[in-house]
Image (cartoon, helix red, strand yellow):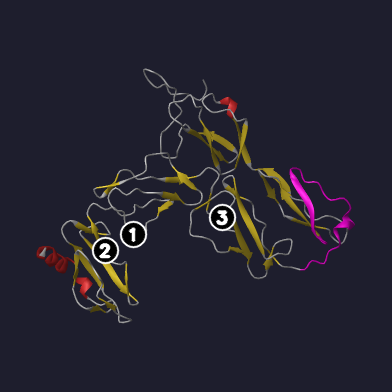
Amino acid sequence: MWILSFLLLTWFPAVLHAQGAAGSCPRPELTHGFLVPDQQSYPEYSVTYACDDGFKSAMESWWGTTTCQNGKWFPEPFCIDQNSCVPPKIPGGKCSTTSGWFEENEKLTVDCDPGYRLTKAFPQPTCIKGSWTSIPTCEKKRGACDRPPKISNATILHEASQEVFAEGSQLRYECKEGHNTEDGKTQESISCRAGWWMTPLPCSRVSKYSGTPVENCGEFPIVENGLVEKSEPLALRVRCQHYYELYGPEKVVCYNNNKWSVIPTCKANYCSVNTDDYSDIIPAGVKFITNGEKIELECKNLFYFTSFRVVRCINGKATVSRSSKDTLEKRCYFKSKENLQESGEKI
């Protein structure tokens, strides 16, 4: 053991130098291990520790490091039985433990974060001789949303650091100073629906308009695939139906000559794919995809592997991929006693 102590002193000379003089920590209690250097107090030190034979640090290495911060050690040094396990890192999920590690034969329970689900069913992982029998994974749920896009002239409030949001999640945003939505509000919210964020009401600079009431221009203009409604006494608001994009100003006003300002249009912003055209996909009618988005179409249950076709909408054109994932070449396969026959575009 003195050899390991000598190596630690040689390989980690930086731990012997103080990081600052803002405070000091008393010698940490360490069972089944020793500190380098070993002294009664440490003024803002980063201290290395090693564990006795049959034990390992809670960092699962020969040694661990702990730092004195404002009079406390972080992380708290521990030497655990070499047959114990530390919590595995699970992207999109977490596991809870009261002690910070798991004893041998203890089982692991994983909770996926909002918007994630366990990839597949499997036997509950068990800690055996310092290792897990399996490591579960969490994947993004269908219908969950990625981080919301930036909103012009607005800031999303209390935005979490998470990368994925469960379907139905709502986030509030606030317009910058001197801006508001067309209904005069300074705060609004956006919702996650079917994998995409609802189009937010834009924040526009507050201005005074010296026009006339919209009733002076007669009947409201008609915008195909759009909704025209009165948003204020001197203006109309035009909003497009889902899968259509607004071209032109969202606000329409009545000029003093009783003529409408420029009327915007709603143009198609989607692709469509008929699932009946693909014999290896479960029939689900015609599916619509917003431009720039993608969906997964599930393969029939008669296939050997449960898989998906990926459909992307790019510049108004739908492309149907033969891969179920961006990086995995999984496809729809028929069951066969002798071999697996790959399905084509149409059968």
Q: Earlier in the sequence, mark 1 or mark 2?
A: 2
Secondary structure of the residue carrying tag 2 is loop
Q: CA distance from mark 2 to mark 3?
A: 43 Å
> Which amino acid type is shown beneath numbered disc 3?
Pro
> Which amino acid type is shown beneath numbered disc 1?
Gly
Q: CA distance from mark 1 to mark 2?
A: 9 Å
Q: Please tell me which residue is depicted at 32% across the width and 49% down the height of the picture.
A: 106
Q: Is residue 217 magenta?
A: yes
Question: Residues in magenta?
Answer: 208-234
Q: CA distance from mark 1 to mark 3?
A: 37 Å
Q: Is residue 167 above or below residue 1?
A: above
Residue 54 visible within the image: yes
Which numbered circle lies on residue 149? Answer: 3
Which numbered circle lies on residue 100? Answer: 1
Q: Earlier in the sequence, mark 1 or mark 3?
A: 1
Q: Is residue 322 above or below residue 264?
A: above
